[in-house]
Image (cartoon, helix red, strand yellow):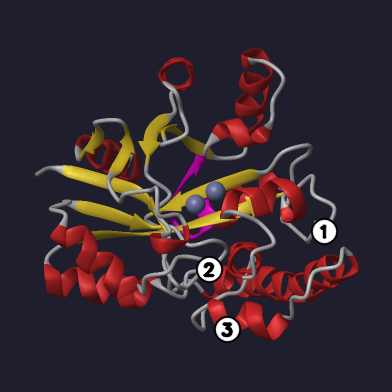
Amino acid sequence: MNYVDLHVHSTASDGSLTPREVVAQARAQGLRAIALTDHDTIDGLGEALAAGAELELEVIPGIEISAAHEPGSMHILGYFINHGSARLDEQLRVLKQARADRNPQIVANLQKLGMAITMAEVEAVSGGGQVGRPHIAQVLVQKGYVADFQTAFEKYIGNHGPAYVNKFRFAPRDALAMITEAGGLASLAHPFTLEYSSTGHLRSILIQLRDWGLAGLEVYYPEHAPERQAAYKKLALEMGLLMTGGSDFHGSIKPEITMGRVGPNLYLPYELVEKMKARLVR
Ligand SMILES: [Zn+2]
Ligand SMILES: [Zn+2]
């Protein structure tokens, strides 16, 4: 097998498997390489890289940074980052604090909406890593307030939900600089979540981001229907952006997602990684 998954989460952010378990599962599934891209943290990379060396699976040190964007959300993936960078660590600590401050506010809003939910319950399901909205969703499901994870976001805690609380995010330019200054390549994750109005609108956003250091576009993603995927592929080619892709694996938190699988019968070749490496040395 010669397949890769360039978008994977662990317990260091909101996945359900530890970094080591993620690597072991990737190995068991016969993948050749994965990128660990936890939200706003590099805390899982040391463990993942050590496990990769031991189990003979290539692990690309990555991250997924949330940047400020209206009306949707902008996630920027970083690949081949120097996870020993003290400056990066310092910048990420700002985000960690912002996230910690926000969770109790969301829980308080849910209480106001009549739901019996506490921060202690949310922390209990987080597995000791970073606590975030997916954990809040998990408690809402467990307590029967919503049928599933997605409904929790749609009805209550998603960006347009009544319990949503905005949090500090870096401006796109700063998020891109964080990645490039740490020696990495930046790629725009799941572009559709930008909620752009047309392909032309997306193109203008990409032109701006590329000026600020964007190197790639996440073309392959489970929620990209064939037409959307084709449009992103065309844009990437037209704009000289690398094509990246991944499953956005989160373990049991998103059970419908299988690591390495980005669509019905769609798996990504190692060639994507080779192209990134070629761009790095340029
Ligand atoms: Zn994302
Ligand atoms: Zn993700």
Q: Earlier along the polypeptide chain: callout 2 or callout 1?
A: 2
Q: Tell me, for residue 124, which label it has, or none.
A: 3
Left or right, 204 with reference to 191: right
Residue that badge 1 annotates: 163
Judge by depth and name the residue closer to the eye, 83 or 140.
140
Marks 3 and 1, how far apart at CA? 20 Å
Which structural element holds mark 3? helix
Where in the figure is residue 40, as x and y percent of width and height?
A: 57, 63
What is the three-letter code of the residue carrying label 1? Ala
What is the three-letter code of the residue carrying label 3? Ala
Occupied quadrant, residue 206: top right
Where in the figure is residue 124, as x and y percent of width and height?
A: 57, 84
| Highlighted range, magenta | 179-189
Where in the figure is residue 193, as x and y percent of width and height?
A: 62, 36
Residue farthest to the right?
112
Which structural element holds mark 2? loop
Q: Tell me, for residue 41, which label it has, or none.
A: 2
